[in-house]
């Protein structure tokens, strides 16, 4: 089994990172009105037949939002799950339009940084069976 799937999770580190940007990120999360306007500006959402999992708001609410709700107390299974959400399901193109200014790409970037702190990131070497297309 890959190293990143078995290593223990440093929940204190995750909590520390979440706390560093708590005010800003929680404000952005709470500002989301779930209106779905951002969805059609995401080419991945459109390219996947409007699969709700590709909606920009879905991606941040189910990754960063859950990290805050769980106060960083997450297991490796959870991190492996959100890895796909914040890498495969988003290319950080910055095209998602939110009328109230929820900055989806910067929230996804922050979530990627938290994953990386636990050595969770896409395996792009030749031995990996993961597909990121
Ligand atoms: S991020 Fe903005 S556009 Fe997207 S659902 Fe939330 S409020 Fe609506
Ligand atoms: S930054 Fe991510 S969520 Fe926003 S439009 Fe691009 S791929 Fe979609």
Image: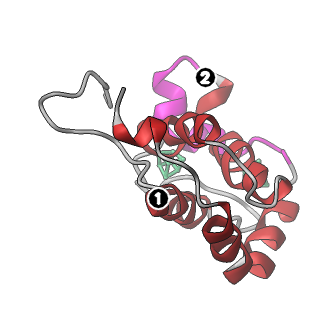
Q: Quadrant of residue 92?
A: bottom left
Q: CB atoms at circles 2 and 1 under 8 Å apart?
A: no
Q: Is residue 42 magenta?
A: yes
Residue 27 as seen in the image, left or right of residue 21: right
Residue 105, placed above or below residue 78 = below
Instruction: Name the residue beneath numbered marker 2.
Output: 50
**Residue at horizontal 49%, vertical 35%?**
84
Q: Which quadrant: the N terminus?
A: top left
Residue 32 as seen in the image, left or right of residue 63: right
Q: Label for residue 94?
A: 1
Secondary structure at badge 2 equals: loop
The one of 12 and 98 positioned closer to us in this rendering: 12
Mark 2, other Cα within 10 Å: few <14 / some 14–19 / many ≥20: some
Q: Label for residue 23?
A: none
Residue 26 x, y percent position in the rendering: 81, 69
**Residue at horizontal 31%, vertical 26%?**
130
Residue 1, placed above or below residue 103 = above
Q: How is the image coloured?
A: secondary structure
- Within 8 Å: ligand 2 and the Cβ of disc 1? yes
The one of 61 and 32 positioned closer to us in this rendering: 61
Give the mark, 2 or 1, whose residue is nearer the N terminus: 2
* Range of residues picked out in magenta: 34-49
Secondary structure at badge 1 equals: loop
Residue 5 x, y percent position in the rendering: 45, 36
Q: Which quadrant: the C terminus?
A: top left
- Within 8 Å: ligand 2 and the Cβ of disc 2? no
Mark 1, other Cα within 10 Å: few <14 / some 14–19 / many ≥20: few
**Residue at horizontal 53%, vertical 60%?**
105
The one of 123 and 59 positioned closer to us in this rendering: 123
Alpha carbons under labels 2 and 1: distance apart: 18 Å
The one of 74 and 27 positioned closer to us in this rendering: 74
Residue 94, placed above or below residue 133 = below
């Amino acid at each position: 089994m890959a190293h990143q799937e078995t290593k223990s999770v440093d929940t204190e580190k995750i909590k520390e990172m979440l706390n560093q940007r708590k005010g800003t990120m929680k404000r952005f999360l709470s500002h989301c009105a779930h209106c779905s306007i951002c969805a059609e500006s995401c080419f991945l959402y459109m390219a996947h037949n409007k699969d709700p999992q590709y909606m920009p708001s879905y991606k941040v609410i189910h990754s960063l939002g859950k990290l805050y709700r769980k106060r960083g107390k997450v297991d490796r299974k959870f991190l492996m799950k959100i890895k796909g959400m914040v890498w495969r399901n988003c290319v950080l193109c910055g095209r998602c339009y939110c009328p109230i200014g929820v900055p989806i790409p910067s929230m996804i970037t922050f979530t990627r940084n938290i994953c990386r702190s636990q050595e969770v990131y896409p395996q792009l070497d030749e031995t990996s069976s993961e597909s990121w297309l």
